[in-house]
Image (tube, rainbow, N blue to C red):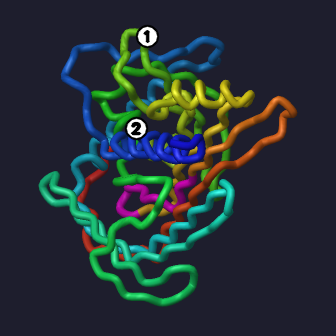
Amino acid sequence: MTGHQWSVLLFRVILISLAIFFMGTHPAKRVFSVRQNTQNQADPSRLVATLKKSEKYCQRLDQAALEFVCLEEVTEMTRHYTPWTDIYLYDYQFIRRDKEIKERRNLIAVNGQKTNIRDSSLNTVMFQYKNVLFGPVGLLSKSWQAYHDYKFIGEDTINKEKAMVVEATPIPTFIQPHCYGKIWIKEDDGSILKIVWDQRSLGNFPSVEEWAKAHDSDPHITAFTEYGFEKNGLRFPSRSYAENAYIGKDKRKFVNAEISIVYKNYKFFAVETEIKYD
């Protein structure tokens, strides 16, 4: 296998691992008290209160009955040897009833040319993802908060909405592979506006580091999701992005591959949940 083939397959493993996390699976039941890293914070109670709201938000998200359709525009690019870019436009349907999830895609355009392929698979080559909607559950739900430390980073504004920026890292005793990173939380209701995943938490990252070291470079993987649409108190993805890049000794950045997923034209048929906060 060539180095090019190896790196492509390796990055598929990374994104597949991230996709499994997006599904919001829970760890085995254990009893922990939630830990907040409150060092150098003027008001630790503010972080505690926000995390409690996010816990309740994730509970509603994890239990909601959902049915919606949207357009999903996927742009995938690689710069290896013969650079190419493909743009796929899907009519995407998502249904969840009684914890059962159904995703369906109809491919309606490829690189601007209309097509009509019903029940299409995801045609991406180097990246895989699934159930992006549930990314917050694996970081801020009640069961997962017990496995993380949280640190207040600062404040930010996304799409004119103010957010508290919080960094989540696994507690030292938690060794199970798990994605973590920085979270933009809407402080008044605990909903999630954005998640930026720490590259060290992505699947098989030590092997990525090893490959980069062998090629006199450092890995520079970017992966984030923005939740820019709101319906009945729940937030839905507006964009996901991932970039596989390396930084050479000359400090120049080489982007190996990237993907951008844009969600638009949402139509909601069911968002059945009641969100209440103390």
Q: Please name the residue shown 33% across and 34% down the image.
A: 141
The residue type indicated by label 2 comes to Ser
Majority secondary structure of magenta residues: strand
State whether residue 189 appears in this view.
no
Quarter placement of the C terminus: top left
Span colored in magenta:
231-241
Which is nearer the N-term, disc 1 or disc 2? 2
Point out residue 221 in the picture as x, y percentages from the top left corner: 61, 39
42 over 56 or under it: above or below: above
Residue 214, compared with residue 262, is above or below; it is above
Q: Are marks 1 and 2 in contact (CB under 8 Å)?
A: no
Up the image or down, 112 lies above or below 63; here it is below
> Left of 170 or right of it: where is 268?
left
Asked if residue 21 shows in the view, the reply is yes
Give the crowd class for mark 2: few <14, some 14-19, many >=20 residues within 10 Å: many
Along the line of sight, the residue nearer the viewer: 89 or 23: 89
Q: Which mark is residue 172?
A: 1
Q: Secondary structure at mark 2?
A: helix
Q: Position of residue 247 (x, y in %)?
A: 75, 35
Distance, label 1 to label 2, CA atoms, is 23 Å
User: Which of these two is toward me, 175 or 244?
Assistant: 244
Q: Position of residue 226 (x, y in %)?
A: 54, 53
Query: What residue sits right under mark 2 in the picture?
Result: 54
Q: Residue at x 53, y 88 (%)?
A: 113
Residue at 56%, 43% in the rendered image = 2
Mark 1 residue element: loop
